[in-house]
Image: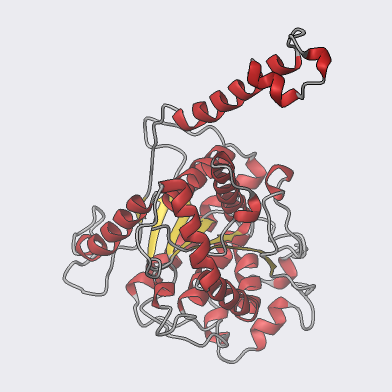
């Protein structure tokens, strides 16, 4: 059966990707004769970024919903009671904050419009606001995904797409995908705390929130950008990867910036399973970052619409991650005799080949209908045409 999904996009890359996922799903529904109004509550989206207002490009803006969470909250970065000042005053986070704090006097970024490609700025904004802003949104999404209405909607979609309803019980456990970049400012800075907030919101009936799957774009995705924007990407990526590895290998690591999140903390920090998504595999090259977003969105929307594929992926990931963690890595920094040094990241790719029969079927139906209507409106005079025959009767004679 189709299952519930929660897609979380962090920063500009994450937002563009999950908007494209929603676009793909709506397009697939329209091919089946459905409309955007039939979109199920079981497929939820959360878009999280630093700016107050979403700035997704126009082509994808039409697929935005009321799910955007802007973190800046009209707070300046510098000065008294600014973002830096508030974090510096928190007793429970001071010891951690001083290890990566940026001198506020050197930060000339208006966080109301973004993090300016500075990961430390995005990290600070998220550290201050993610906990308070995200938990209500997570609760609302979970309630919508697990409602009786959402189950009915999924059964309707399964009947339309697959031709049958596989069972009458509850749908399979929901899946959480978190999408971000490693090298940007906002997404790279906030995705760890966002993942922690989601995982720590789990409870006895929502343990699936612990199983966050992260899809993170590597620096190659942005190599088409100009030199100014690319300048901080390597450093941002190094910091993000360091935090991922630390969070994975230190299972007792807490989440000091999420004091308000009430739930089960689980093991380690960040996504439970992290996959890296790049622009090339050595043979196939995606030309631009937008091509990478489109490709990733195709992978994710394909998983939604192919229950057997996502079930296989989850089984393989959950089953093989511990096994792979027991293998030594090429750099010899992973000690396979240490049980808690789990594999930090893996890679993800997908390809599909189709003859386009679904689209041809739609085209053929429309073409035949169009031809019939054209013929009906251009028919010559028939016997009885002057006797008041109705159009439907004339068409029957044809």
From this view, report whether residue 320 is shown above or below residue 354: below
Camera sees residue 277: no
Residue at x-position 72% and y-position 66%:
106
Q: Is residue 1 left or right of residue 256?
A: left
Kindly give the residue lying farthest to the left in the view shown. Answer: 337
From this view, report whether residue 306 is shown above or below residue 273: above
Residue at x-position 69% and y-position 70%:
71
From this view, report whether residue 158 is shown above or below residue 71: above
Q: Nearer the viewer, residue 79 or 45?
A: 45
- The number of numbered badges drawn on the structure is 0
Image quadrant assignment for residue 170 = bottom left
Q: Looking at the figure, which quarter contains the C terminus?
A: top right
Q: Position of residue 278 (x, y in %)?
A: 45, 44
Q: Position of residue 95 (x, y in %)?
A: 53, 85
Image quadrant assignment for residue 70 = bottom right
Q: Nearer the viewer, residue 292 or 301?
A: 301
């Amino acid at each position: 059966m189709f299952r519930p999904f929660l897609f979380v996009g962090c920063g500009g890359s994450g937002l563009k990707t999950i908007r494209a996922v929603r676009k793909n799903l709506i397009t697939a529904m329209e091919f089946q004769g459905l409309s955007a109004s039939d979109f199920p509550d079981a497929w939820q989206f959360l878009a999280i970024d630093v700016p107050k207002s979403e700035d997704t490009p126009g082509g994808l803006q039409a697929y935005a919903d009321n799910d955007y969470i802007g973190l800046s909250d009209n707070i300046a970065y510098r000065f008294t009671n600014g973002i830096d000042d508030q974090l510096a005053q928190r007793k429970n986070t001071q010891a951690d904050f001083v290890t990566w704090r940026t001198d506020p006097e050197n930060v000339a970024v208006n966080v109301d419009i973004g993090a300016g490609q500075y990961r430390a700025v995005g990290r600070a904004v998220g550290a201050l606001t993610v906990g308070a802003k995200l938990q209500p949104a997570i609760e609302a999404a979970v309630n919508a995904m697990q409602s009786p209405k959402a189950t009915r909607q999924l059964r309707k979609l399964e009947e339309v797409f697959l031709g049958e309803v596989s069972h009458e019980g509850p749908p399979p456990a929901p899946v959480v995908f978190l999408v971000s970049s490693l090298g940007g400012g906002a997404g790279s800075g906030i995705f760890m705390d966002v993942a922690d907030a989601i995982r720590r919101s789990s409870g006895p009936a929502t343990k699936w929130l612990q199983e966050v799957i992260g899809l993170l774009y590597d620096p190659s995705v942005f190599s088409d950008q100009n030199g100014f924007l690319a300048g901080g990407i390597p450093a941002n990526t190094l910091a993000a990867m360091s935090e991922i590895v630390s969070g994975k290998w230190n299972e007792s690591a807490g989440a000091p910036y999420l004091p308000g999140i009430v739930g089960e903390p689980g093991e380690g920090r960040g996504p439970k399973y992290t996959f890296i998504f790049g622009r090339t595999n050595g043979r196939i090259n995606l030309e631009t970052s937008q091509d990478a977003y489109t490709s990733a969105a195709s992978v994710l929307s394909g998983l939604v619409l192919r229950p057997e594929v996502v079930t296989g992926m989850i089984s393989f990931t959950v089953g093989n991650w511990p096994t792979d963690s027991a293998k030594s890595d090429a750099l010899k920094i992973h000690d396979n005799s240490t049980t808690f040094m789990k594999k930090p990241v893996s890679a993800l790719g997908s390809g599909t080949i189709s003859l386009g029969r679904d689209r041809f079927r739609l085209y053929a139906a429309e073409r035949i209908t169009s031809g019939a209507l054209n013929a009906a409106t251009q028919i010559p005079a028939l016997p009885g045409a002057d006797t008041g025959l109705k159009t439907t009767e004339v068409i029957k004679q044809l």
